[in-house]
Amino acid sequence: MSIVAQVAAGVAALVHLVVWVWEAFLIHRVHYTVFGQPAEDVPAIRLWAFGVGFYNLFLACGLIAGLVAVNSGHELVGRTLVVYVSWFMLLSSVVLAVADQLAMSRPRNQAWGGVAGEGIPPLVALLFM
């Protein structure tokens, strides 16, 4: 696996680790600046955010496990994990983009930072595989 693909997969894992912390533990602090949700909505979204935060953790762990496998001589296993998780992340960014265009939680065109953060690193990893 190329170094570019590995770095991009590492960046994707890091992004998902940061989002895990934001969603699972810091939603009461970052609800508006990161997610555009007003303070009065935090109690209603807290359970959702906690679960989605851990979903991000598990995705990051999949990429990290894949990178460890690739670099410890288990190329097929590692590449398989990185490809699967990267596609999962990329397709999830498409779902986020669609939800944004449907204005599912706030006015349209406000989730493009999240779409890019979730989708570009795994796309780069896939392109350089």
Image (cartoon, rainbow, N blue to C red):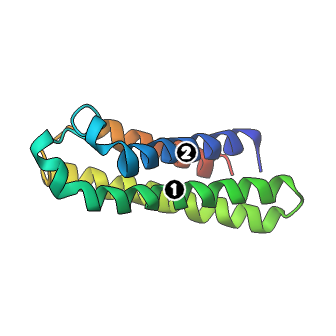
Image coordinates for residue 70, horizontal then vertical, percent = 80, 56
The crowd level at tag 1 (other Cα within 10 Å; few <14, some 14-19, many 20+) is many
Amino acid on which the number 1 mark rests in the picture: Leu
Does residue 106 appear anywhere in the picture?
Answer: yes
Q: Which element is circle 1 on? A: helix
Does residue 38 appear anywhere in the picture?
Answer: no
Instruction: Tell me the distance, in whole angstroms, between the alpha carbons under discs 1 and 2.
Output: 11 Å
The crowd level at tag 2 (other Cα within 10 Å; few <14, some 14-19, many 20+) is many
| Count of numbered tags | 2
From the image, tell me which residue sits under label 2.
12
Question: Please, which residue is most extreme toward the top here?
Answer: 33
Image coordinates for residue 112, horizontal then vertical, percent = 29, 38
Amino acid on which the number 2 mark rests in the picture: Ala
Of residue 129 and residue 62, the one placed in the foreground of this image is 62
Q: Which element is circle 2 on? A: helix
Image coordinates for residue 74, horizontal then vertical, percent = 85, 64
Q: Residue at x 10, y 45 (%)?
A: 40
From the image, tell me which residue sits under label 1.
57
State the mark number for residue 68. none
Q: Are marks 1 and 2 in contact (CB under 8 Å)?
A: no
Q: In screen coordinates, is 2 left or right of 47?
A: right
Res. 35 image quadrant: top left
Image coordinates for residue 61, horizontal then vertical, percent = 61, 58
Q: Residue at x 27, y 61 (%)?
A: 47
Of marks 1 and 2, which one's residue comes earlier in the chain? Answer: 2
Q: In screen coordinates, is 92 left or right of 104?
A: right
Q: Residue at x 66, y 65 (%)?
A: 81
Q: Viewer-nearest of labels 1 and 2?
A: 1
Question: Please, which residue is most extreme toward the right here?
Answer: 73
Of residue 11 and residue 4, the one placed in the foreground of this image is 11
In this picture, is 61 found above or below 2? Answer: below
Q: Residue at x 77, y 51 (%)?
A: 1
